[in-house]
Image (spheres, grey):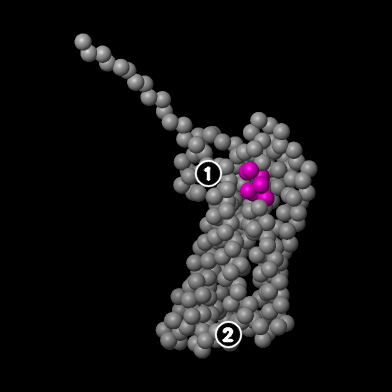
Amino acid sequence: MLVFYLKSHNKNTTKDIHPYVFKSFLCMQFCNIIATTFDFIVYRIPCTSFVTSYLSTMKSDSIIRCFVVCHYGFDYISQFYTVLFCFIRVLVLYNPRSHLEVCRILFVVWSLVSVLLSICGSFPHIWYDAVGMQLDSPFQYGAIILTTTFAYGNRPQNIGGYFFSLIVTVSIAAITLIMLIKMKNLKLIDQHSKLKAKAETTLKITMCIIIIPSILSQTFALASFWAYNYACYIILVRPVFLDCRVNIVSCYFYWTHPYFKQKVTPKPVSVRSLSTS
């Protein structure tokens, strides 16, 4: 998608997608992919007990702390960009004419604030010791997840992280609801109504795909605060919701949006017949 955008965004060949809708989508998915990569490092691979023997000898000032910081940081900023993507999409829907400058300012300011807040929320982990937390059933013996003493046993920090994700999820749900109400009353009557309707439908379903796993993930996370015995089962299904947001959203958006199905018009070739006498 990024290569396609870099090749075509200056050609003005289509108006099927707003530039800042697409930029916020790319930022959201880029941060999600990086967060998922660090999720493998600090959660998924250690859960297999494949590296437990090595990690059992790690020092408290291990580089693992940096991985934890990066995981939290990119997770936070990806959630900020998710809200931005949904908000810009609805802003364009409600104000289709005079929105380009507003979206540009919003994108820049939101990006700067998101980066600063994400750094403030994740950087304290670097000052604390790295630890491995043993997991219970259904995980096998030796399965651990990596974290720091800043998060381990720090209930206020965990509750704060949950409420941050909850606020993000509620915001996305509210924006999605506003979008659905608007689209119900929207009439696409221009000459490119079919392509435009297809593009709007793709964005609508993309937002729905984002919100469904987010709501389920928050529900399970809330249950883990009281149902301690089932916390490991929640950790077991957690990657499913994370992968839904990262992989399914990207694939659906790319395969269905008309922006990525532009037809290349072949250049006319002149043919001249040569007669021989």
Q: Residue at x 58, y 85 (%)?
A: 138
Examine the rendering and report whether any part of residue 104 can be seen.
no
Q: Which residue is mark 1?
A: 260
Residue 162, horizontal then vertical, whole percent: 68, 71
Q: Which residue is mark 2?
A: 138
Please rate how many residues cluster around mark 2, counting C-alpha atoms within 10 Å: few if below 14, some from 14 to 19, many from 20.
few
Quarter of the figure with the C terminus: top left
Q: Is residue 152 left or right of residue 48?
A: right
Labels 1 and 2 touching (C-beta < 8 A): no
Look at the image and say whether residue 201 sits in the magenta stretch.
yes
Residue 149, horizontal then vertical, whole percent: 57, 81
Q: CA distance from mark 1 to mark 2?
A: 43 Å
Q: Which residue is at the front of the view, 256 or 25?
A: 256
Label 1: state its secondary structure. Answer: helix
Q: Which residues are magenta?
A: 198-204
Look at the image and say whether residue 232 sits in the magenta stretch.
no
